[in-house]
Image (tube, rainbow, N blue to C red):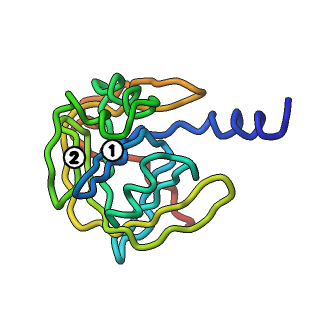
């Protein structure tokens, strides 16, 4: 097995959420499915998204200087496939229920969303790392769509986890 293949398999064992990163210019819209998305900073509120260097959404983000992160719910696996496809960028949002907020397309029914102003693009091998400052965000409802070992999965959450409540953890014994 080549090192790149093993590398992919090793990190494929790290379960992630699934998001669609969207953007729009005055003349074009588009988006892509991503799992290399994470929070970066609380002060200021920063998000990190990784784009393949040849991702067709990257020029949109670069031109618009803003993007949306749409965290997909378990009911949106088909959307993940649409945005991961080779459809033309302008066709990806066709037939997808969405709205425009802060000049960014946001997908209806997403588990959570954030609108980000582009702060910086950083070269990272065959990817470009985008750092965005969150300018608006919100929550939806449902179960998360997950990516693990090369395919989509649905998490089985308890009722308290569905409500976003922390699971009580036993206290560590104190030294006496």
Q: Is residue 110 above or below residue 37?
A: above
Q: Quadrant of residue 85?
A: top left
Circles 1 and 2: CB distance less than 8 Å? no
Find residue 32 and report its horizontal and vertical position in percent: 41, 41
Screen quadrant of the C terminus = bottom right
Question: Which residue is depicted at the point 41% across and 47% down?
Answer: 169
Binning the other alpha carbons within 10 Å of mark 2 as few (below 14), some (14 to 19) or many (20 upward) gives: many
Mark 1 vs 2, N-terminal side: 1
Secondary element under disc 2, as helix, strand or loop, is strand
Horizontal side, residue 121 vs residue 71: left or right: right
Question: Mark 1 highlights which residue?
Answer: 30
Question: Mark 2 highlights which residue?
Answer: 106
Of the pair 126 and 47, the residue shown nearer to us:
126
Instruction: Give the CA separation, mark 1 to mark 2.
Output: 11 Å
Question: Which residue is depicted at the point 62% across and 35% down?
Answer: 12
Find residue 43 and report its horizontal and vertical position in percent: 36, 77
Find residue 6 and report its horizontal and vertical position in percent: 78, 35
Q: Is residue 34 above or below residue 121?
A: above
């Amino acid at each position: 097995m080549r090192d790149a293949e093993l590398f992919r398999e090793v990190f494929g064992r790290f379960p992630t959420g699934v998001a669609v990163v969207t953007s729009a210019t005055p003349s074009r819209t588009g988006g892509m499915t991503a799992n290399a998305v994470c929070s970066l900073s609380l002060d200021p509120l920063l998000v990190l998204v990784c784009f393949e260097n040849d991702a067709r959404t990257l020029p949109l983000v670069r031109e618009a200087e803003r993007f949306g992160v749409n965290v997909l719910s378990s009911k949106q696996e088909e959307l993940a496939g649409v945005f991961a496809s080779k459809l033309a960028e302008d066709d990806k949002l066709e037939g997808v229920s969405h709205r425009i907020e802060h000049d960014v397309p946001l997908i209806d029914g997403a588990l959570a969303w954030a609108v980000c102003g582009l702060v910086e693009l950083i070269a990272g091998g065959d990817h470009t790392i985008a750092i965005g400052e969150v300018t608006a965000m919100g929550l939806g409802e449902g179960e998360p769509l997950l990516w693990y070992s090369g395919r989509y999965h649905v998490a089985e959450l308890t009722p308290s986890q569905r409500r976003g409540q922390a699971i009580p953890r036993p206290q560590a014994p104190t030294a006496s």
